[in-house]
Image (cartoon, helix red, strand yellow):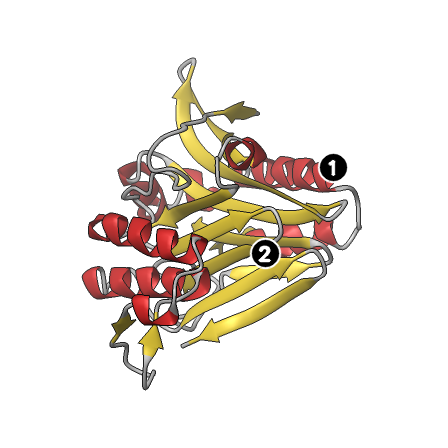
Amino acid sequence: MKLLVFIFLFFIQIKVISQSLYGTSILYCISDKEVIIAADTKINFTTPHKDSSHIKIQHNNNLSWVYSGFSAMGNQFDVNKIINLVASKKKSYRNTIDEIDTRIINILVKCDYIFYNNTVRDRILKREGKILKLLFVSFVNKKVQYEILEYILEQKGGQEQITSYLIENQDLLNHSPNRVVIGSMGKYDTDNTKYVTEISKLIDKKAKNSQFPTVKIKGFSTFKVDSYAKLLYYLVYRTSLKYPSEVGRPITVYKITNNNFQLLINN
């Protein structure tokens, strides 16, 4: 079951960026012609992956996605496998998302890791029942389409059930005066909010290069925050310094357009 939960708040074109119970840090910038997504690669708690990092921004056919939360649990649940399977069918955007949503819920409600594994269950309940959050991006008739779904374990009528909530979609972009939406999924250092506003204004007015700040980041000789891609990278990087046990490098930044899925930064 999908419910719509919308909030229209905050600066001119900047969505409220708030703290989250998810350890992952993901920042996104969405406009009519392109989408920029930055994400850390640290894995905090998931059973199939033996390594400590994983690329969270994925793409198949005309569908891109990024996730935070419990993306995989043993052999019972793997969100990337589910999405890749459905995306490969090359259905319409709406039918693809609806089928993915249905499949995820149907598998989660049968997942022993959620209902019988005390370690996993305790972590989910401590996170207010929040299991998984997904951002989907696609281009339909050369126009961007996106939505964020969140899956929550909750009590209803004395029984536990898993519900998907539509947190945000295209309507937020349509109501944004400058046709740009900046938002986050997962951990975010809220001390950076003023910084986001200032840099966004410089980018939007195409300010001179000398007006943009240069910051120190390990792995870069110089790093000038003069684009949305670099801004998002820097925000995730700053968050990794504040929450090193939950957010970690390398950080990847991808640009998604009508006919391209491009890696911009991997450091």
Q: Where is residue 158 in the image (x, y as percent from the top left)?
A: 40, 15
Q: Residue at x 38, y 70 (%)?
A: 209
Q: Report the quarter where the N terminus lies.
A: top right
As helix, strand or loop, the secondary structure at mark 1 comes to: helix
Q: Which of marks 1 and 2 is in front?
A: 1
Determine the CA span between mark 1 and mark 2: 17 Å
Q: Which amino acid does label 1 sit on?
A: Asn
> In the displayed structure, does residue 46 sit left or right of residue 30?
left
Query: Three-letter amino acid code at disc 2?
Result: Asn
Find residue 146 and report its horizontal and vertical position in percent: 59, 42
Residue shown at the point (49%, 61%) measured from the top left: 56
- Rendering coords of residue 201 (x, y %): 37, 51
Q: Name the residue under label 2.
A: 80
* Residue highlighted by disc 1: 95
Quadrant in which the C terminus is drawn: bottom left
> Is 37 on the left-hand or right-hand side of 92?
left
Tell me if mark 2 has few (under 14), some (14-19) or many (20+) residues whose alpha carbon lies within 10 angstroms of its own: some
Judge by depth and name the residue closer to the eye, 31 or 259: 31
Dividing the picture into quarters, in which one does residue 217 lie? bottom left
The location of residue 167, given as percent across then percent down, is: 47, 33
Q: Quadrant of residue 145?
A: top right
Looking at the picture, tell me which residue is in the foreground, 79 or 137: 137
Q: In the rendered image, is residue 24 in sight? A: no
